[in-house]
Amino acid sequence: MPAEPTLPAPARVTDGTNGSEHAAVALTGVTKQFGKITALDAVSLFVRHGELMTLLGPSGCGKTTLLHLVAGFLIPESGEIAIDGQRITDVPAYRREIGIMFQNYALFPHMSVAGNVGYGLRMRRIARPEIDRRIADALALVKLAGLEDRRPRQLSGGQQQRVALARALVIRPKVLLLDEPFSALDRNLRASMQVELKEIQRKLGVTTIFVTHDQSEALSLSDRIAVIADGRIRQLDTPHEIYRHPSDRFVASFIGDANVLRAHLERIEGAVASVALGAARVTVPMRTLEGSAVGSAVDLFVRPEDLRVAETDAAAAAHGTVAAQIYQGGHIDLYVDAPEVSSGRVLLRVPSHEAASLRPAGTRIAIALAADVAIAFRSA
Amino acid sequence: MPKLLRLLGGATVTAILGFILLPALVVTLAAFNSRAILSFPPESWSWRWFVKAIAYDDFQAGVRNGLIVTAWASSIALVVGAAFAFALDRYEFRLKRTLETILLSPLVVPHFTIGLGFLILAAQLGFARGYSVIVACHVVLVLPFVLRSVYISLRNLDPRLELAAASLGASPGRVLITVTLPLLLPGLVSGWLFAAILSFNEFTASLFVTVQRTQTLPVALYNYVREYADPSMAAISVMYIVATATVLTLANAFLGLAKVLNVEHAR
């Protein structure tokens, strides 16, 4: 049977690595269906060596499916998957040299900590002294030395997670897969585990794919983020680029807090445009406004920290009434009713030290833009 | 008033527990009666009915036959039931509901119907009424219990444990041996034990498919009681209760022990 010619990967993903042969993990045109539902639709993704790539999206977007495809728990309907340049699309999970850590850690309850960590080594029929040495090294890496004989149920959540990490890393995987690993931990522990995971990942230089629906987690941990929705990658970029230059309305509203303000397009100058919001003017890229004519209404996306309280009316983008003032420690969140620009409440994030004069609910204020660059989309 | 209610509640619970235990208690006391009739309460005490019951040939044969039938029936039911439980838990296929209904149907069909069915079938097919017919009959009777027990254990098994094992390099066979089966062990053992106790006690269907040579203990007891009414019946009952309780206690200790043994195994 003659093989169908494979088309080059669609250029949906802009990426420094040019093609699969240089990527640690390469997915090319991968489609996965569950019955009539398309979980992933011709997705191409190239993960660089040593990179921490986050798959971020709402639940049901296909990010976990993508992870399971890389792990070998699922086989795609079409497309190719390669690790280190080797095609592994239909290689079973147990021959893929992949470490995975699940949300609930999936530790073997009938084995000790050492039994869990050593499992992958025993499956590789490595000699006993070597196994013992590598278990000790792995447990030292995750700071659990001395707990070898404990059972998983005798450990705290954080310790269980360390065991799961040690178990996944001890086999020296080509790729480390993390499936929502922090969502079962309480807030304080989560932050310290995130830092620790990032340190370990950098120290070992292991290529890592990390799945989460928590955008702040994604922003703080990732080298790059792939924002996924409805089985497609919407944007693939560094956390800063994703936050500052979202490619579409979905990404803009999913990552971080954003105010959507009614503005209008005043002038087009090549690749950029000037948008007017009250007396304020802001420059936006034309890329996301294609087809909009001068004078038409646009939705201006502004981060809460890019808004401030205006001292004078001269540069006021809008006027509003403070609905609530919420002290957050380092900053203060001001929720403002400003019906002329937004049907919902506008959120201003003001540094605490600047908020010398408190503005109780009911105060009339003028809102100004703190940034001269933003992003706008055609009115929905 | 609440105190009165609590007292009343306590009394009710005690009464219910007493009602459950009363038959066993009456029979136990009757077993030690030295007189040759089944009477209660006994006037003087003796072990003689135990001695007589143990020495009685039909009872000895009944225990032997019963153990043979039970061992085969519950073991076969375990293998068949576990296989079906796996299929029902892991795979989607047409007529899955129908298969499940058929496998659980012995719970609704009366035992004498199943016994009679096997009797007619064996006669039609020209089978001698040997052990094989009794074992086959018991397998059908206890299968739903084994199936349920294994199926519930499988449902409670987190599939991510098997995925984790696979990602760590375990082939499907080794995943089964090192993760799935050890974690299912309590379910398998309790399923087998449940089947064994049911099979050993089964009377209605056994009455149809056994003959004098192959009769199991409950059938032997029935035949005995048709002719005699002395306390050896009660003595057998007491031994029955003690034996079953011992097996269950041992099983519990063994299952607890299995977990401890697994620690060593896992290292």
Image (cartoon, coloured by chain):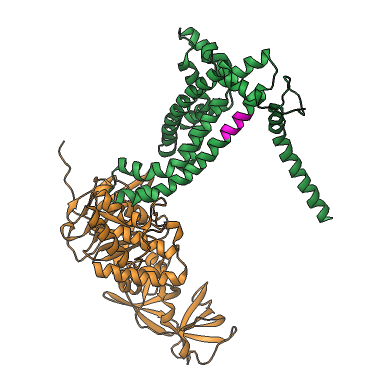
Chain colours: A orange, B green
* Residue at 45% over, 7% down: B126
Where in the figure is residue A17, as x and y percent of width and height?
Answer: 18, 64
Q: Which residue is nearer to you in this view: B10 or B60? A: B60
Q: Residue B105, can we see it? A: no
Where in the figure is residue A234, as x and y percent of width and height?
Answer: 33, 62
Q: Quadrant of residue B224?
A: top right
Q: Which residue is nearer to you in this view: B51 or B94? A: B51
Q: How many marks?
A: 0
Q: Is residue B143 above or below residue A13?
A: above
Q: Which residue is nearer to you in this view: B45 or B133? A: B45
Magenta region includes residue A94: no
Q: Is residue A243 above or below residue A78?
A: below
What range of the chain is rendered magenta? B238-244
Q: What secondary structure is the stretch in magenta mostly built from?
A: helix
Q: Residue B91, can we see it? A: yes
Q: Is residue B199 left or right of residue A150?
A: right
Q: Is residue B152 left or right of residue A232?
A: right
Q: Is residue A27 left or right of residue A347?
A: left
Where is the C terminus of chain A found, in terms of image quarters? bottom left
Q: Is residue A60 above or below residue A139?
A: above
Where is the N terminus of chain A found, in terms of image quarters? top left
* Residue at 45% over, 59% down: A154
* Residue at 41% over, 39% down: B90
